[in-house]
Amino acid sequence: MPAITCPECEAQIELDAGTEVGEIIVCSDCGVDLEVTALEPAAVQLAPMEQEDWGE
Ligand SMILES: [Zn+2]
């Protein structure tokens, strides 16, 4: 499994099988939302907390 480093707390997070680009994962260490931006190599960025965008 690819693993990424949380940009917030630097914890190592293993991505689940089937994780796709654009998916939001949650750091189990600090709880921040992370958006998967690439898989090979795996990369994430902090996901914006915009609850208004969930309407669709
Ligand atoms: Zn974290």
Image (cartoon, helix red, strand yellow):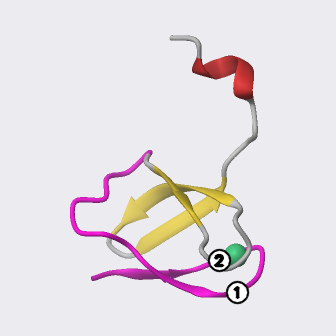
Q: Is residue 53 above or below residue 20?
A: above
Spot occupied by residue 52 in the image (x, y as percentages of width and height): 72, 18
- Residues drawn in magenta: 1-22
Q: Residues within 10 Å of mark 2 (few under 14, many from 20)?
A: many
Q: Position of residue 22 (x, y in %)?
A: 44, 45
- Which amino acid is tagged 1? Glu
Dividing the picture into quarters, in which one does residue 8 lie? bottom right
Quarter of image, ligand 1 = bottom right
The residue under label 2 is which amino acid type?
Answer: Cys
Q: Which residue is mark 1?
A: 10
> Which residue is at a point 63% across and 59% down the rendered structure image?
45
Q: Give the residue drawn at x 38%, y 72%.
A: 15
* Tag 2 residue: 6
Answer left or right for 39 relative to 30: left
Q: Check residue 47 in the rendering and tell me which mark sits there, or answer none.
A: none
Q: Is residue 5 left or right of residue 50?
A: left
Residue 10 covered by magenta stretch: yes
> Mark 1: is the Cβ under 8 angstroms from ligand 1?
yes
Locate residue 14, reporting x and y percent. Answer: 41, 81
Q: Residues within 10 Å of mark 1 (few under 14, many from 20)?
A: few
